Image: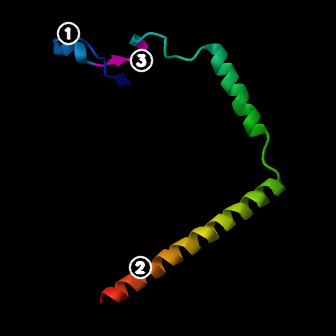
Amino acid sequence: MYFIKRSSDSDPSNHLTMRAQERGTRSRPSDDDRVRWMWLANFALRHAPTEQVVAETEALARKEQAAIKRRIRRTAEQVKRQSKSKQ
């Protein structure tokens, strides 16, 4: 992987990108960070949603979809009326 390296030199060869192995370790996560993120990922994946949570989420999604459809229909009716009045 290559990244653009900014340089104040006017030499074009200094504007080439550096390989990941050649860069410093500042942007690499520490082992402590990796352990913490892996623990968090395992915790999140271990607790699957219950049937009740899934049912509630589906009900909310259906309600939101119905509201969106109503708004779209209202807008379509308004456009239809405006186009008829222009004719």
Q: Which residue is mark 1?
A: 9
Between discs 3 and 2, the one toward the N terminus: 3
Q: Secondary structure at mark 2?
A: helix
Q: Which residue is mark 3?
A: 20
Image point 67% across, 62% down: which residue?
61
Q: Secondary structure at mark 3?
A: helix
Image point 62% across, 67% down: which residue?
65
Q: CA distance from mark 3 to mark 2?
A: 55 Å
- The structure's colour scheme is rainbow
Between discs 3 and 1, the one toward the N terminus: 1
Quadrant location of the C terminus in the rendered image:
bottom left
Which sits in the foreground, 63 or 17?
63
Is there CB contact under 8 Å for labels 3 and 1? Answer: no
Q: Which residue is mark 2?
A: 79
Percent x, y of residue 13? 20, 14
Q: Quadrant of residue 32?
A: top right
Q: CA distance from mark 3 to mark 1?
A: 22 Å
Q: From the viewer's perspective, is residue 59 above or below residue 19?
A: below
Percent x, y of residue 59? 74, 64
Q: Is residue 55 magenta?
A: no
Identify the amino acid type marked 3.
Answer: Ala
Magenta part of the chain: 17-21
Between discs 1 and 2, the one toward the N terminus: 1
Task: Indicate which label's residue lies in the foreground, 3 or 2.
Answer: 2
Identify the amino acid type marked 1.
Answer: Asp
